[in-house]
Image (cartoon, rainbow, N blue to C red):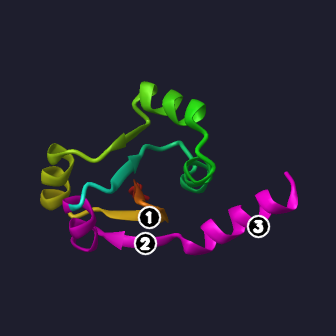
Amino acid sequence: MNDKDQELRAHLNAETAKIEWAELERHFAHGSVVKVDAPLDLVEVAICMVRDDSETLRGWMTDGALAKATEADARAWVARKPVFWAVVAAPWVLVQEIEYSDG
């Protein structure tokens, strides 16, 4: 990994934050929320989006691990009120639901 890669990774990592659905609703209304399934690394996905690595992104989309949030997602999130890790890779807001384990 070169210095620019490390700098981008550090920048995006520093920009991640926990966010609740209520804070994401306006971004969803603009069509800019993209859900990232576990076990993908949220920052790695953001790096690929910033770099326009379409081949890698297309693979994740084909696998269903990366997708634009849908109305069904929004309804489920309203009902469950999950917490997400989020990062902006303009114009997208990438979100990954935080999984809490019992115990």
Which is closer to the viewer, label 3 or label 2?
3
Question: Tags 2 and 1 in contact by the CB under 8 Å rule?
Answer: yes
Q: Is residue 92 left or right of residue 58?
A: left
Res. 18 mark: 2
Residue 27 sits inside the magenta stretch: yes
Amino acid under disc 2 = Lys
How busy is the neighbourhood of tag 2: few (under 14 within 10 Å), some, or many (20 plus)? Answer: few
Figure check: 2 above or below 81: above
Residue 44 image point, x, y percent: 62, 50
| Res. 38 in view | yes
Provide the major secondary structure of the magenta segment.
helix
Find disc 3 in the rendering and name its residue: 7
Residue 101 sits inside the magenta stretch: no
Residue 50 image point, x, y percent: 58, 54
Find disc 1 in the rendering and name its residue: 86
Q: Report the span colored magenta.
A: 1-29
Which is closer to the viewer, label 2 or label 1?
1
Q: Is residue 70 left or right of residue 97?
A: left
How busy is the neighbourhood of tag 1: few (under 14 within 10 Å), some, or many (20 plus)? Answer: many
The tag earlier along the polypeptide, 1 or 3, is 3
Q: Tell me what residue is drawn at x 48 percent, y 65 percent.
A: 87
